[in-house]
């Protein structure tokens, strides 16, 4: 799903590029990636600079082809478990929780030859933690038996022009610099391109790719989504996972979205156990209490997850 939908000013298009290089023609025209972008064979693939990890730039629609690359071109062994990590760039785990998460994910990955999918953005805590797991396990054993796959937006990556390769030249207009650096310790990098620059990554492509790896080509690989932090944009991909019967694990006290989801899960899990003998007075009291809690959560959402106006940078998701 494209986050940006409308043009906002004369200097910059919704896709993040200047109007001179954008494919939209009218000032108030709705920007649509299917209409205003063109596909062409990618020249951005190879080995990441200063690394032994392969990378690929791909179109946002090429989920099945990416699976073929992972299994047949890069020859990654079929995993026994897939873990998709959902995080954000502002949440920070406390020391105790960080150690528990590191130990739990590391043990699960090593025991099951897992694939761990993150955004690959160095600024996100989850990507950094997974990179740390890879690094520590490589120190212990060079023959790593699990894979950490970064799946992030091409238009969000800093210094992406370096990924064209030494013998290749970018034939298009200069694009805005990306806001995120790639975490350097992942084992593989998929950079999907939806035509936007520095737009919010809600994880939908990573979610779709994880499900295709899990269920495609008659595979039946267990898949779990782990929410450690997260922001409002991640709700779409989490909802898609639940609709597709993917297990979702939420780490409480790991960040704004995870905290709110845990709170409401605890508040609603016993609803089915409510007695039919509840009096009208009890019902009214519970309703007032519920309304008060909802008011608090509405304030939290407004301040913690305020969606940007057209042209604004995505806001911080820190609780206030």
Image (cartoon, helix red, strand yellow):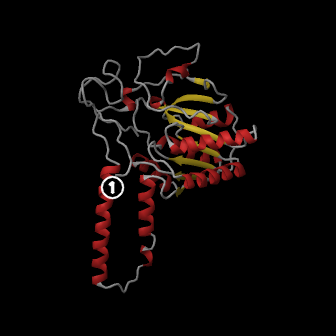
Q: Residues within 10 Å of mark 1 (few under 14, many from 20)?
A: some
Q: Quick one: 37 or 263, which is closer to the camera?
A: 263
The picture places residue 82, in percent across and down from the top left corner, at 62, 48
Query: Which residue is pictured at 60% across the width and 55% down the height?
Result: 100
Q: Is residue 69 left or right of residue 249?
A: right
Q: Considering only vertical position in the picture, is 108 above or below 9?
A: below
Q: Residue at the spot x=28%, y=34% of the render?
A: 6
| Residue highlighted by disc 1 | 300
- Residue found 39% across the figure and 31% down from its top: 33
Residue 27 image position (x, y, % from top left): 24, 26
Dot 1: element: helix
Q: Residue at x 45, y 70 (%)?
A: 269
Coordinates of residue 225 in the picture (x, y in percent)? 54, 52
Is 198 placed above or below 172 here? below
> Where is residue 73, by image quadrant?
top right
Number of numbered labels in the structure image: 1
Image position of 85 (left or right of 141): left
User: Where in the figure is residue 150, as x and y percent of width and height?
Assistant: 57, 37
Residue 66 quadrant: top right
The image quadrant where one finds the N terminus is top left
Left/right placement of residue 291 relative to residue 185 reads left
């Amino acid at each position: 799903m494209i986050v940006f939908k409308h043009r906002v000013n004369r200097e910059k298009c919704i896709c993040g590029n200047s109007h001179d290089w954008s494919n939209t023609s009218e000032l108030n025209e709705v920007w649509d990636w299917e209409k205003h972008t063109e596909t062409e064979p990618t020249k951005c693939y190879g080995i990441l600079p200063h690394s032994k990890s392969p990378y690929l730039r791909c179109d946002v629609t090429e989920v099945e082809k990416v699976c073929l690359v992972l299994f047949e071109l890069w020859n990654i062994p079929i995993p026994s478990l897939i873990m998709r990590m959902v995080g954000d760039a502002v949440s920070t785990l406390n020391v105790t929780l960080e150690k528990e998460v590191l130990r739990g994910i590391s043990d699960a990955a090593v025991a099951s030859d897992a694939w761990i999918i993150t955004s690959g953005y160095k600024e996100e805590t989850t990507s950094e933690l997974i990179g740390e797991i890879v690094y520590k396990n490589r120190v212990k054993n060079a023959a790593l038996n699990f894979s950490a796959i970064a799946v992030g937006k091409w238009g969000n990556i800093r210094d992406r022009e370096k990924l064209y390769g030494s013998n290749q030249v970018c034939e298009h207009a200069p694009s805005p610099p990306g806001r995120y650096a790639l975490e350097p310790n992942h084992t593989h990098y998929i950079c999907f391109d939806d035509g936007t620059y520095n737009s919010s990554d809600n994880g939908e492509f990573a979610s779709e790719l994880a499900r295709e790896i899990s269920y495609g080509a008659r595979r039946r690989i267990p898949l779990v989504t782990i929410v450690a932090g997260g922001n409002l944009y991640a709700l779409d991909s989490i909802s898609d996972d639940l609709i597709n019967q993917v297990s979702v694990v939420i780490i409480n006290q790991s960040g704004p979205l995870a905290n709110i989801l845990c709170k409401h899960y605890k508040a609603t899990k016993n609803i089915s156990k409510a007695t039919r003998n509840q009096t009208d007075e009890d019902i009214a009291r519970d309703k007032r209490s519920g309304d008060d809690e909802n008011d608090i959560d509405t304030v939290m959402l407004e301040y913690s997850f305020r969606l940007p106006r057209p042209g604004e940078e995505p806001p911080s998701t820190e609780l206030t």
